[in-house]
């Protein structure tokens, strides 16, 4: 048990695999570094708040500028860490970040007003991000990648799940970059510049073999300026760039409006390195009020299919 005025990190350092650390309501100003398997960190909901101290903690997480770090390696991952029922806010970089993890779970947690990602992972497998709120972060609400600091083909996420989250006010609700075998389902995504981004390129294996299903994606109409890799983003619902064999199914996509090349409801767009989308299946989605189109195939990659979608306008015509 950690009470206000006590150190969460001291409890983490003293914990053994399988221990649970319960954090009572209050504000805790520190950066938390976790390297212990099967550790559970649980608060009392949004009344348990983790925010930065005037001076970062003297650990790797503090040096990186993140709130909570779960850190192993791709060869020796930290496994079965569970984070639940707290609020992580105001950090310069990511709120909650896993690197080299297996079966990391983040549940019923709020990440808010962090300088990069709300929560996410790299070099990790079998992650679970369920029933969280991630809002007003400068980059993504949830960000998942093969690795953040090197080029390379997609890696297998082994069934990582992003489900039941409420994602708003970020640059992008969910970004999945260069991964395979992952599901984004049942999330409510609104008031971002873009809802869902599936990002691949020409590297092999290709990003794909993903499910994006049963999400509610509406009014992602904030404006985000162009970067050195992307044009400006506004009014983008679900965007696939350079992906393959991804199944976009049963989503409700409404009123995403903008004039960016990636604006629209569900959009297939050539990747930043010119790799087309291929073999993706867009089916049984319901779309309306998206502009310039509800369903837009802007790169005409090979073997993409469009079946049983309900929409008002597609580009080219005939996709509805």
Image (tube, rainbow, N blue to C red):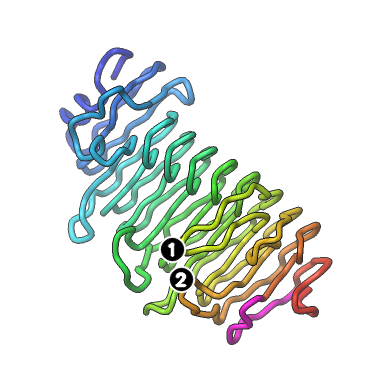
Up-down: is 134 above or below 203? above
Image mark for residue 5:
none
Q: Residue 312 appears at what percent x and percent y?
A: 83, 66
Q: Within 10 angstroms of label 2, few (less than 14), some, or many (20 or more) residues?
A: many
Residue 237 lies left or right of residue 311; in this view the side is left
User: Can residue 166 be seen here?
Assistant: no
Q: Residue at x 34, y 27 (%)?
A: 52
Q: Residue at x 54, y 38 (%)?
A: 135
| In front of the other: 80 or 94 | 94
| In front of the other: 140 or 279 | 140
**Mark 1–mark 2 CB contact (< 8 Å):** yes
Residue at the disc numbered 2: 200
Q: Residue 238 appears at what percent x and percent y?
A: 62, 61
Residue at the disc numbered 1: 177
Residue interval drawn in magenta: 298-307
User: Can residue 35 be seen here?
Assistant: yes
């Amino acid at each position: 048990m950690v009470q206000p005025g006590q150190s969460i990190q001291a409890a983490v350092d003293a914990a053994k695999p399988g221990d649970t650390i319960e954090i009572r309501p209050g504000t805790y100003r520190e950066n938390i570094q976790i390297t212990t398997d099967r550790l559970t960190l649980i608060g009392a909901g949004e009344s348990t708040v983790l925010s930065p101290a005037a001076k970062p903690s003297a650990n790797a997480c503090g040096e990186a500028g993140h709130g909570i770090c779960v850190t192993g390696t791709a060869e020796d991952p930290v496994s079965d860490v569970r984070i639940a029922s707290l609020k992580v806010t105001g950090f310069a970089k990511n709120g909650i970040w896993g690197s080299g993890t297996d079966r990391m779970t983040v549940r019923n947690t709020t990440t808010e007003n962090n300088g990069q990602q709300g929560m996410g992972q790299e070099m990790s497998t079998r992650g679970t991000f369920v029933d969280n709120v991630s809002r007003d972060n400068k980059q993504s609400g949830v960000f998942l990648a093969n690795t953040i600091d090197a080029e390379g083909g997609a890696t297998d996420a082994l069934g990582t799940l992003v489900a039941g989250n409420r994602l708003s006010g970020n640059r992008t609700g969910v970004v999945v970059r260069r991964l395979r075998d992952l599901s984004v389902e049942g999330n409510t995504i609104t008031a971002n510049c873009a809802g869902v981004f599936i990002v691949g390129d020409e590297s092999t294996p290709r990003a794909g073999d993903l499910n994006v299903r049963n999400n509610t994606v509406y009014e992602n109409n904030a404006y985000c300026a162009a970067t050195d890799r992307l044009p400006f983003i506004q009014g983008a619902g679900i965007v696939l760039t350079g992906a393959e064999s991804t199944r976009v199914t049963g989503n409700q996509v409404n009123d995403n409006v903008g004039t960016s090349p990636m604006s629209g409801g569900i959009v297939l767009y050539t990747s930043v390195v010119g790799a087309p989308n291929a073999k993706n299946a867009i089916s049984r989605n319901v779309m309306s009020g998206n502009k310039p189109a509800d369903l837009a195939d802007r790169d005409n990659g090979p073997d993409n299919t469009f079946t049983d979608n309900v929409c008002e306008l597609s580009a080219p015509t005939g996709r509805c």
